[in-house]
Amino acid sequence: MPMGSKYGTHRVIEPVGAMPQTAKRINNDMSTVYDNEILLDVIALNIDSASFTQIETEAGHDEQKIAAKIMSIVAERGKQQNPVTGSGGMLIGKVAKIGSALKDRDLKVGDKIASLVSLSLTPLKINKITKVMSDVDRVLIDGQAILFESGIYAKLPTDMDEGLALAALDIAGAPAQTAKLVKPGDSVLVLGAGGKSGLMCCYEAMKRVGPTGRVIANIRNEKYVKPLRDMKLCHEIAMADSTKPVEVLEAVLKANNGKEVDIVINCVNLEGCEMASILPVRDNGIVYFFSMATSFTRAALGAEGIGKDVLMIIGNGYTKDHAEITLWELRENAQLRKYFEEQYVK
Ligand SMILES: NC(=O)c1ccc[n+]([C@@H]2O[C@H](COP(=O)([O-])OP(=O)(O)OC[C@H]3O[C@@H](n4cnc5c(N)ncnc54)[C@H](OP(=O)(O)O)[C@@H]3O)[C@@H](O)[C@H]2O)c1
């Protein structure tokens, strides 16, 4: 077989010249595997939370309709990219074939891996969806996928359950970025603190701020108060709906001695939370938008509109060593690991 592009552009169908992530449609023909591609037999798709929430709402929470919607997206686009949120997710699969140019990889046929590049750029063919697991945004499938030469992946760790590793690796960029952004003495607000990325970011922020800093967890649901408090994942809780910026600001000021915070990390899976992220941060502070439901336009124009000079960071799903950092968090915090196992191992 010939060599394809390192970045997978040889599989882009339309528009011509696009990259696989931004393409409307990519080639998911699995009978031709290029010399610098890896073919995977897919076991499970972890659909990005913002995407799954949108599909689930559109399908009226009916699992058959959710499966039909996912099948139709993949049939139309050759990849699992939600046309509304634009986001994908990641997968677990078994290596079925390694192209001849990638034989030096630390991989062999039969290895189980998790893809660390988005499903929104991964050629995917679904023969059948065998189970929809709405409570964990996951679907089990019979199908195949392609990893490009530039596609990063992690071999599944042998010391933890697959479901646990999948849940953590899905959001690996967030805690790893938190580790890099937060400094001793910082005040940090985590929006959507009760979810997967929110809990991990809270834990990482608590480690980084030290005795003089403060971590404030924003939630809208009482059920997260106990785990956040029991696991000591925050100093204060700001109970507020993240789609209501003034409500969030008031709760945060109350939790932070009347002061705006240094850093806001947005881990909400719902759109319309840009201003709740920008309003509570101090001038020259940092807003890290991990949420895939973030609108660049709303964030940029919203910050300008209230005269806030803040650094706004797009939540790149990748940062160096993100998989290792995130899995390590679960290894070093037995309580957090147990909570994740209870929530995400099914
Ligand atoms: N940048 C990347 O590469 C990347 C990678 C993976 C995921 N993501 C994105 O990161 C976000 C979080 O993902 P996740 O897997 O951590 O999601 P998750 O586990 O579903 O958590 C989302 C949390 O947001 C909370 N929430 C939703 N609406 C809220 C509101 N109005 N006010 C306050 N809290 C609210 C939810 O609480 P309730 O229970 O109250 O609804 C939930 O605890 C998603 O947008 C996802 O798309 C980004």
Image (cartoon, helix red, strand yellow):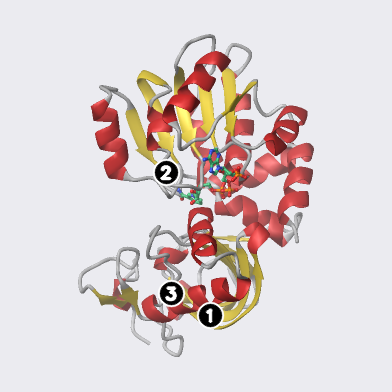
Q: Is mark 2 within 8 Å of ligand 1?
A: yes
Residue marked by disc 3: 73
Q: Residue at x 54, y 31 (%)?
A: 190
Q: Secondary structure at mark 3?
A: helix
- Position in image of residue 140 (x %, y %): 64, 73
Q: Is mark 3 within 8 Å of ligand 1?
A: no
Q: Residue at x 62, y 45 (%)?
A: 196
Q: Which labelled disc corresponds to residue 246? A: none
Residue marked by disc 2: 315
- In the rendered view of the protein, which quadrant contains the N terminus? bottom left
Q: CA distance from mark 2 to mark 1?
A: 28 Å
Q: Is residue 220 above or below residue 73?
A: above
Residue 39 visible in rendering: no
Label 2 amino acid?
Gly
Q: Residues within 10 Å of mark 3 (few under 14, many from 20)?
A: some
- 184 and 136: which one is in front? 136
Frontmost of labels 1 and 3 is 3
Label 3 amino acid?
Ile
Q: Residues within 10 Å of mark 2 (few under 14, many from 20)?
A: many
- Position in image of residue 145 (x %, y %): 50, 76
Give the mark nearer the N terminus: 3 vs 2: 3
Residue marked by disc 1: 144
Frontmost of labels 3 and 2 is 3
